[in-house]
């Protein structure tokens, strides 16, 4: 185990193979998906999942990432979207890439009825504290292989709202995730609904420091138009421009994204920027999003540096910021 | 003439005494993430096998499991239970209600849902090779068919027409809207069992006689969920009140009646109800019916003939 050389005081990050020294992380892809399965798709008559093939595809993609300088990937899909902890352990051992897996859930549409219409009268959806308890145990006791066992600790608690949200239950998810981040020291990822600043405030209202939150989706056109990236950086949270490589109705282009990075850096917020692709290694029941995990470092960062981002700042964004985010905080 | 069981098709003559609405283990989707409900496979078999063995020894022939897709339905497990206990187990396709259908299915069209159900009935459920013998549909919490519930009902009607297997409903409230869909799809109502007409929450709002008059079958299939239990669930009902209701209904519509206990052998995502098992049918209901003057022919109609008619795949 890599953890054997650590002392009790070394800063560490939770990976699927256990805590590793934070300084080992290297270049991190912070908002990605390894295996992504729409809830229920595992029962679909017309979809199948060949574990050996999934393993081969993910191995190839992680090896390519490593060849482009990548050392750590964060699967930020949460606990109910195809997360397969044992597969990720084998992948990490096989490729040498650190894999940080996440707990958490959202948006509401992806939740099972257990959380939304429980067998009580009336069927009141879960409140924040129950989500907090569920997610916290995934950090303190280990991530679940459903109805079988717990494995290694989650390294991130992730939540998301519908783009028109948050709904009442999504607000409970935000609050529950914030409480888990506070209780365990892992960071919180918040993919906002309609208003990033308002949604961040929900997490902060739970007493979580802004520096323990990464707000995702800030390269959405609505976020950029509202000035949300700068506002979130000023509030002290991490700004994830996490659809690098995508240009569509919902997201700005890489050129606009790169200009945004340069603007944020010039405004003194380079230490708040995170870049990622939301790439999907293997998608089941949803469209592929087949970008190389190394796309940020190999393609996007050169574009940003051509627009004026310094090499030193690029290194901060790729290495220092994700390390600082993912380092588990002491809760004592 | 055949019925799909998890170990393959059998003749309806082999079904014997049928418990038509039961669960090996039921859990809401997502409950598998919450370790508070987890049990080891050793515990699961230890809780389940004695109940099925007792069912068999009482003279039980067939156990219809109506645990829908996404609710912990586990067909390989059912196959092993059936093979080791001698109880025929019929598994279902479909959903207990729209609020138990996960995102992949909640977004799906009627056509897709129809294909899913037909595949599970004619080809098999997942990789198990076992074919579903019934289709489960139901009313979401709230008491009215939601748009998703209606999509599932319509797909079930089409799959029932295509394959010949029958439909069981979770709850018989809002039956007017359900029957309207079955009429639109051209499904004869004797292929539908409108379930839970007897439960403590919904009995008052369920038009059981009206459903029977339309040609539908009516399920008194929560027998044993009684307020007399040590820790009754919210849908419990006084024992005598349910029995009287059942006797009133069957005095006129015995040919439309089916009875079951809706018990869990080993619940997957909830505490279950202590003291309630499928064997209530033998241990309490049959003596109650005999005390009420039922002869063996009436009991055979209720537990053998009616379910055989219902479960037999129509060609």
Image (cartoon, rainbow, N blue to C red):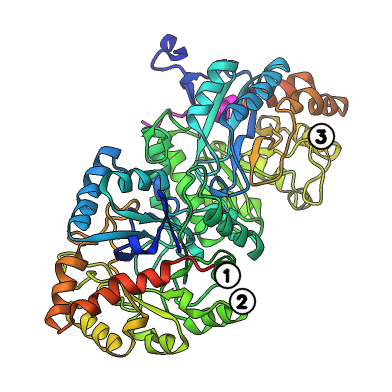
Give the percent coordinates (x, y) of residue B68. Answer: 45, 58
Query: According to the image, label 2 marks what residue?
Result: B185
The residue depicted at 19 percent of the width and 64 percent of the height is: B231
Instruction: Tell me: residue B235, above or below residue B214.
Output: above
CB under 8 Å between callouts 1 and 3?
no
Confirm whether circles 1 and 3 share one chain: no
Residue range (magenta): A322-332
Q: Which mark is residue B161?
A: 1
Query: According to the image, label 3 marks what residue?
Result: A258
The residue depicted at 46 percent of the width and 49 percent of the height is: B130
Queried whether the magenta region covers residue A139, the answer comes back as: no
Q: Of helix, strand and loop, which one carries label 2?
A: helix
Q: Is residue A297 visible?
A: yes
Q: Is A292 or B157 nearer to us in this picture?
A: B157
Q: Which mark is residue A135?
A: none
Label 3 resides on the chain identified as A
Give the percent coordinates (x, y) of residue B214. Answer: 47, 88
Q: Is A50 or A36 nearer to us in this picture?
A: A50
Which numbered disc, 1 or 3, marks the residue closer to the eye? 1
Q: Does residue B70 appear to the left or right of A272 in the view shown?
A: left
2 or 1: tag closer to the N-terminus: 1
Which numbered disc, 2 or 3, marks the residue closer to the eye? 2
Q: Of helix, strand and loop, which one carries label 1?
A: helix
């Amino acid at each position: 185990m890599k953890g054997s050389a650590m002392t009790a005081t070394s800063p560490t990050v939770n990976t699927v193979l256990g805590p590793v020294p934070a300084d080992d992380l290297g270049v991190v892809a912070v908002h990605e998906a390894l295996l992504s399965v729409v809830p229920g798709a595992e029962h679909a008559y017309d979809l199948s999942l060949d574990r050996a093939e999934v393993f081969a595809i993910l191995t190839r993609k992680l090896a390519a990432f490593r060849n482009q300088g990548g050392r750590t990937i964060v699967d930020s899909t949460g606990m109910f979207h195809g997360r397969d902890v044992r597969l990720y352990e084998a992948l990490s051992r096989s490729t040498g890439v650190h894999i940080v897996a996440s707990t958490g859930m959202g948006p509401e549409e992806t939740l099972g009825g257990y959380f939304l219409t429980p067998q009580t009268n009336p069927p009141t959806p879960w409140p924040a504290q129950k989500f907090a308890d569920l997610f916290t145990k995934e950090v303190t006791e280990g991530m679940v292989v459903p109805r079988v066992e717990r494995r290694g600790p989650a390294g991130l608690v992730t939540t998301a709202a519908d783009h028109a949200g948050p709904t009442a239950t999504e607000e409970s998810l935000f609050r529950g995730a914030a409480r888990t981040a506070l209780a365990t020291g892992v960071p919180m990822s918040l993919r906002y609904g309609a208003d990033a600043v308002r949604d961040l405030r929900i997490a902060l209202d739970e007493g979580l420091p802004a520096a323990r939150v990464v707000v995702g989706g800030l390269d959405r056109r609505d976020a950029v138009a509202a000035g949300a990236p700068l506002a979130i950086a000023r509030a002290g949270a991490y700004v994830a421009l996490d659809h690098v490589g995508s240009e569509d109705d919902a997201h700005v282009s890489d050129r606009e994204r790169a200009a945004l990075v340069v603007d944020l850096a010039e405004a003194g917020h380079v230490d708040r920027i995170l870049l990622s692709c939301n790439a999907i290694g293997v998608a089941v029941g949803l469209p592929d999003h087949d970008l190389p995990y190394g796309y940020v470092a190999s393609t996007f960062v050169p574009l940003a540096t051509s627009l004026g981002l310094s090499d030193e700042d690029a290194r901060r964004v790729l290495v220092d910021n994700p390390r600082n985010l993912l380092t588990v905080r002491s809760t004592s | 003439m055949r019925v799909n069981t998890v170990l393959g098709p059998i003749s309806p003559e082999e079904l014997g005494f049928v418990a038509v609405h039961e669960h090996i283990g039921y859990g809401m989707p997502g409950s598998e993430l919450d370790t508070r409900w987890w049990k080891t496979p050793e515990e699961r078999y230890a809780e389940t096998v004695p109940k099925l063995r007792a069912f068999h020894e009482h003279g039980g022939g067939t156990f219809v499991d109506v645990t829908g897709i996404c609710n912990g339905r586990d067909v390989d497990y059912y196959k092993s239970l059936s093979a080791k206990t001698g109880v025929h187990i019929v598994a279902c396709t479909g959903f207990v209600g729209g609020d138990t259908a996960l995102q992949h299915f909640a977004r799906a069209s009627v056509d897709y849902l129809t294909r899913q159900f037909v595949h599970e009935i004619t080809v098999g459920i997942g990789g198990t090779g076992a074919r579903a013998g019934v289709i489960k549909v139901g009313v979401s919490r709230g008491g009215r068919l939601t748009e998703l519930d209606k999509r599932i009902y319509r797909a079930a009607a089409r799959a029932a027409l295509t394959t010949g297997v029958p439909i069981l409903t979770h709850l018989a409230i809002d039956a007017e809207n359900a029957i309207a869909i079955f009429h639109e799809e051209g499904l004869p109502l004797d292929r539908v069992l409108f379930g839970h007409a007897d439960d403590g929450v919904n009995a008052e709002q369920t038009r059981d006689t009206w459903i029977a008059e339309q040609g539908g079958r009516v399920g008194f299939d929560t027998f044993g969920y009684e307020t007399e239990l040590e820790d009754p669930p919210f849908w419990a009902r006084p024992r005598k009140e349910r029995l009287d209701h059942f006797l009133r209904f069957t005095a006129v519509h015995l040919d439309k009646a089916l009875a079951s206990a809706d018990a869990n052998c080993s619940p997957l995502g909830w505490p279950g109800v202590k003291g309630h098992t499928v064997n209530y049918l033998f241990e309490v209901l049959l003596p109650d019916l005999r005390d009420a003057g039922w002869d063996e022919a009436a009991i055979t109609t209720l537990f053998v003939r009616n379910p055989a008619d219902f479960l037999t795949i129509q060609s």
